[in-house]
Amino acid sequence: MACKLSILLLIFSLTFFIITQAHLSEKSFNINLAKNTQKLTKLHFYFHDIPNGNNPTAVIIARPANQTTIGFGTLVMIDDPLTEGPELSSKLVGRAQGLYGESSQGKSGSLLMTITLSFTQGKYNGSSISILGRYRVVETVREMPIVGGTGVFRLARGYALAKTYQYDVKTGAAISEYNLFVLHYDIPLVE
């Protein structure tokens, strides 16, 4: 009986796979990158991480059961404002959305960050940059890789430098100064 059920399940799975694959359409485009100019864009803004108060922008979503503070294994979801100046009241240029997790068991204070910087102003409005990498809290300047982007930043790569501008020990609120160096192509959207 179990053998018949396994065979029936296998046949159903294969049939479903074949039917779904038959309905997928594929288009290929040749993009001549030699004709598209590669650009280096430098961006500067401030990142506000606010874990407490009436409107937190960073919220713990998971932590080990035996832990009461932030430490190894803690995951934090963020929707942090990006501003032109260090004051939260300065012009909003976008949001940093994603998550970071404490990835170090030692005192090195390392986070694994996976965030998307979504821009909302000017010529970058609607574009985004993706960052995925190690964020060494103990270093004065932290370097993280840019692994992609959308809109103006299609095929983006580069690096982000983060430096603590201000940190409140009581509340955990942090303001970081970010400098990004982004290589990207000016490629039109192809449908």
Image (tube, grey):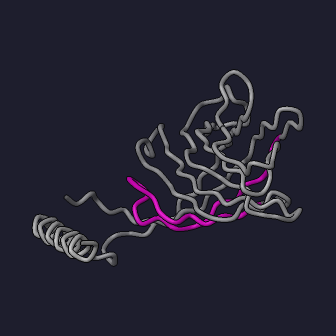
Please give the count of numbered marks on the rendered protein.
Answer: 0
Please check the rendered image and state whether residue 148 is part of the magenta-colored stretch, yes or no: yes
Q: Which residues are magenta?
A: 142-166
Q: Image point 86% across, 36% down: which residue?
A: 168
Residue 190 spot, x, y in % from top left: 22, 60
Left or right of 37 in this view: 20 = left
Residue 82: image quadrant is top right
Query: Which residue is painted at 82% across and 59% down in the image?
Result: 109
Between 123 and 71, the one nearer to me in the picture: 71
Against 89, residue 19 (above or below) is below
Q: Is residue 120 above or below residue 124?
A: above
53 drawn magenta: no
Q: Measured from the top left, where is residue 143 in percent x and y? A: 71, 64
Most foreground residue, 30 or 16: 16
- Image-based side of 176 in relation to 61, left or right: right
Viewer-closest of 142 and 65: 65
Q: Quadrant of residue 142?
A: bottom right
Q: Which quadrant holds the C terminus? A: bottom left
Q: Residue at x 47, y 64 (%)?
A: 156
Position in image of residue 1 (x %, y %) = 24, 72
**What x and y, as percent, mark residue 104?**
78, 64
